[in-house]
Amino acid sequence: MTKDTSIQYLPGVGPKRAQLLESELGIRTLEDLVHLYPFRYIDRSSIVRIADVHPDLAQVQVRATVQKVRLFAKNGAELPADQLKYNMVSRLSAIVADESGEMEMVFFKGVKWMHARLVPGSTFIFFGKPAVFGSRLNMVHPEVDAPDAGTTGVLTGVYPSTEKLKNAGITGKVMLRLMGTALQEILPVVQETLPDYILKEKGLVPLTYALRQIHFPVDQAALAKASYRLKFEELFLLQLSLLKQKYIRSRNAVGFVMNQVGQPFNDCYNALPYQLTGAQKRVIKEIREDMRSGHQMNRLLQGDVGSGKTMVAVLSALIAVGNGYQACIMAPTEVLSQQHYANVSKYLRPTGVKCALLTGTTTAARRREIHAGLLDGSIGILIGTHALIEDTVQFRALGLAIVDEQHRFGVEQRARLWNKGWGGTAPHVLVMTATPIPRTLAMTLYGDLDVSVIDEMPPGRKPITTLCVGEGKRHAMHNFIRDEIAKGRQAFIVYPLIFESEKMDYKNLELGYEEIVKAFPLPQYKVAIVHGQQNAADKAFNMDAFAAGRANILVSTTVIEVGVDVPNASVMVIESAERFGLSQLHQLRGRVGRGAERSYCILMKGTKISKESQKRLDLLCATENGFELAEEDMKMRGPGDLEGTQQSGLPISLNIASLAKDGLILSDARAYAQHILDLDPTLQEQKNAPLLMELQRDKYQSKDYSKIS
Ligand code: ADP
Ligand code: MG
């Protein structure tokens, strides 16, 4: 057998089970099988006294002697112990005891066999999860082993499984047996994947050792070494592939050379009403270097809500214009595009550069004007929704494409921007996100991009006071909003709308709106409402009323999450806050605290919220640092669920390493991968041949990373 042999040829598998293992776990070959690692280990090294067993324990094993066995029918009636019609038996109960006490073992299946086996007076090791039923301590379907069997394996691996696999008899025990056989076949022919010198430099154990110990560890120390080696390898190869592609691209991708800063940039810069922050200046410098390097820029700009990314976008766009090119800024929503358009127009006033807004609601006549202006070059900057990537939109010379909140766009939409460059050359690309992404995730998700971070807020911002209160404080909350309105401020009230289509959620929103209108009646108060099912005109009317200060309160769904800028708003109330993720709550909170006044975020929580939800809300009250929150969010929910990752997706699914837990290994692996590429950028040296071979594998080919942005 070789590593590519189908698992169906393993003793005890066969075509049927092989089929099932493939469809359920994606395992086809022996190699696949040995790379399915236990997700936890059971410590069977100790035997617990029955007196010490309690239902909070995970799985335990006891060594006990059978006292009494009873059989029960479906209706609960006890059946005679010499029962031979086992089909009438629905439950077998065995009372077992050790010197410290007694407990019950319960079986609903395999009753006949257990009945024969559990002869009173005989001793076994019972292994399972303790529970309490009635007032009696029990275990349901424990594993039953010979009395001397318990202490053989010290740590027993537990493998991922599914209902179908269990039904087909592929239990944990069977998996262990298959794994044992597969290892016997594979280990003698396994090829070391990492070059010798890397094992030495990084102090890693060989692959064969790692594989044996990850499945059948002799002790905790061996397991730790094995798991470190496999995690390092996984993260290292992934980073190596990302960095190698980045290297190849930056060498091959020709970019428009934008040598000068240009007059428009200077005109805008000199007229700015404020000083740029140090972080803004640094980032603009990084972008400027990219744009004149001759290579195509592919840069991710991360900056918390309110950190001033728009200004960076405008100045970058003006560099393009100052060099004779055009720029576009694509935003995910109509509202956001309009807001960008309003802001950008303001900044452009001193420059004489013309910008235009193109969205789904732009009239046909206006569209024609814009198309013409783009072709003759009189429009320097185009702002809009994905309407601007339609085929009919042609630029004279697009040199820079900026994508705001890039994770809201699909890969394909973003790729279409690449094709709009002048003369077939891709434009420079700057993608911006306000979603702080944990460093480890950014390194993986955007491993082949250059990353700039605005890690400094514009001066003069007041901290936002965040509090979390229950239903009992609703009245007080209303009074608080009245006080703020009396001071001339405005308030947001946001309702969760997890699925735009969910009727229940709309019901909540509508009821909430009615309640607010009652509590804040006309003519003294004006309440606006915005949600996803309104038509564009209603939405714009309500938004404008709030933005212009005609409405005191804006009741809305999360459509306001992204980018809405109303500096006069000082209160953000979030209803059913427990239903939002941490990052999203943070984004919403960022809608206030933009003006000079003190701002507040009030998290209204439901009556029955889980411990974990409470922890999330507490964390939000404790810190305003978006990166810290993102790290925590990832620890609690895993990287897959994080805002910002759903659409782009991880470039590869990790088998053993975790972005949430293995940050240190990841940083080390990335630095080391970079070090190796610095010495041998294309991995042509003989000693790196194994690496080159690994990178040829399918999983590193599956995505065109270079177009991920
Ligand atoms: P975001 O990063 O969330 O897109 P914006 O670009 O909308 O942030 O900026 C938030 C607010 O901060 C805007 O009102 C903007 O005018 C202001 N601002 C940006 N940069 C500075 C600065 N250097 N100094 C003072 N205010 C700034
Ligand atoms: Mg913004």
Image (cartoon, rainbow, N blue to C red):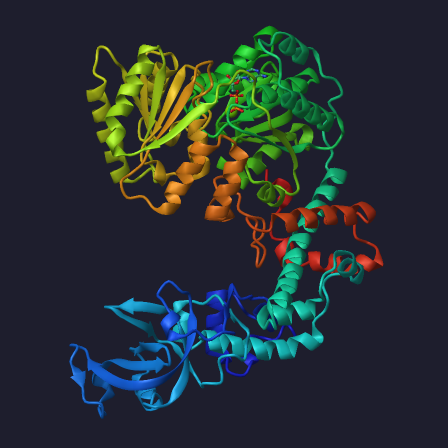
Query: In the depicted view, which residue is nearer to us: 451 or 217?
Result: 217
The residue depicted at 38 percent of the width and 38 percent of the height is: 580
Percent across and percent down for residue 121 are: 34, 90
Q: Indicate left or right for 604 with 161 as reference.
A: left
In this orientation, does residue 265 appear?
A: yes
Query: In the depicted view, which residue is nearer to us: 345 or 436?
Result: 436
Percent across and percent down for residue 686 are: 84, 59
Residue extending furthest front? Answer: 100
Percent across and percent down for residue 592 are: 43, 22
The residue depicted at 68 percent of the width and 32 percent of the height is: 297
Q: Quadrant of residue 490?
A: top left
Image quadrant holding the N terminus, namely bottom right
Number of numbered tags placed on the structure image: 0
Percent across and percent down for residue 248 are: 74, 43
Q: Indicate left or right for 522 with 649 as reference.
A: left
Image quadrant holding the C terminus, namely top right
Q: Indicate left or right for 155 with 200 as reference.
A: left
In this orientation, does residue 646 appear?
A: no
Q: Indicate left or right for 209 with 136 as reference.
A: right
Query: In the depicted view, which residue is nearer to us: 423 or 355?
Result: 355
Q: Is residue 336 above or below residue 93?
A: above
Q: Quadrant of residue 512?
A: top left
